[in-house]
Amino acid sequence: MANIFHARAFPGRRENKRIPVHHTQTEKLKEHEKERDFFCVVSDAFRVFARRSSIMLGSAWAFAGAMLVILVWLLTGPTFHFSDTWQLIINTGTTIVTFLMVFLIQNTQNRDAKAMHLKLDEIIRALKKARNELVDLEDLSDEELTKLEEQFKQLRAKAESDGPNMRHRLPAESR
């Protein structure tokens, strides 16, 4: 016989309390942030900053702003008699900006590459005829990647010789 719970089995009276089920995402993030350590908070803040910066700094407006700074610098050259200090200002400014941009660009590229790999891995796993060994190729050694590249070159050459009706097989399977 199935185990049936009766109201008497639960002490206390039943109350019809309404607990808000839908929290806003901001509230959830604030609750979650309290539980995380300092490194995670800094990492996430940098991720958000890098993402927003890459969007803004990759725009035509940012390029126009950079051109405007260079134009102002050039136009002030005669005023400062094209001095060493005048040149040092632009050299220092561009060096600092370049140094910081390297980290922003690298962070964005790392995230984009990771997302792309995960998407491709999901496609490989979803296709029945796909070789699951191709998942996580970025972890293979250079030697293993070269062998795999050779397999695909052979596959491409076979496809070109067989024409459009070529069934996708590995070169080892066609022997």
Image (spheres, grey):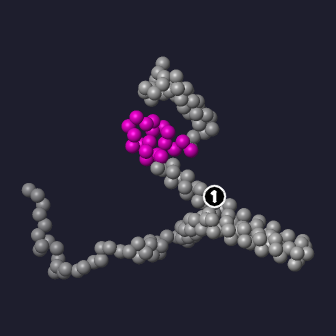
Instruction: Give whichever of 161, 127 is nearer the camera.
Output: 161
Q: Quadrant of residue 51?
A: bottom right
Picture residue at 72% right of the left edge, 68% below the top: 67
Query: How many numbered circles does the render carry?
Result: 1
- Drawn side of residue 166 relative to residue 148, left or right: left
Instruction: Give whichever of 134, 90 is nearer the camera.
Output: 90
Is 157 situated above or below 25? Answer: above
> What percent of the width, then of the height, locates residue 120?
47, 46
Picture residue at 68% right of the left edge, 68% below the top: 64
Does the magenta stretch mainly form a helix, a strand or a loop?
Answer: helix
Determine if residue 12 is in view: no
Q: Quadrant of residue 144?
A: top right
> What percent of the width, then of the height, locates residue 153?
57, 30
Is 174 situated above or below 47? Answer: above
Residue situated furthest top in the rendering: 175
Q: Secondary structure at mark 1?
A: helix
Position of the N terminus, as image quadrant, is bottom left
> What percent of the width, then of the height, locates residue 88?
84, 70
- Drawn side of residue 46 relative to residue 169, left or right: right
Picture residue at 35% right of the left edge, 74% below the top: 23
Is 157 situated above or below 80? Answer: above
Is 149 situated above or below 136? Answer: above
What's the magenta region? Answer: 120-138
Q: Is residue 133 magenta?
A: yes
Determine if residue 125 is in view: yes
Picture residue at 41% right of the left edge, 72% below the top: 25
Q: Is residue 145 magenta?
A: no
> What residue would you read off at disc 1?
106
Looking at the rendered structure, the kind of residue marked 1 is: Gln
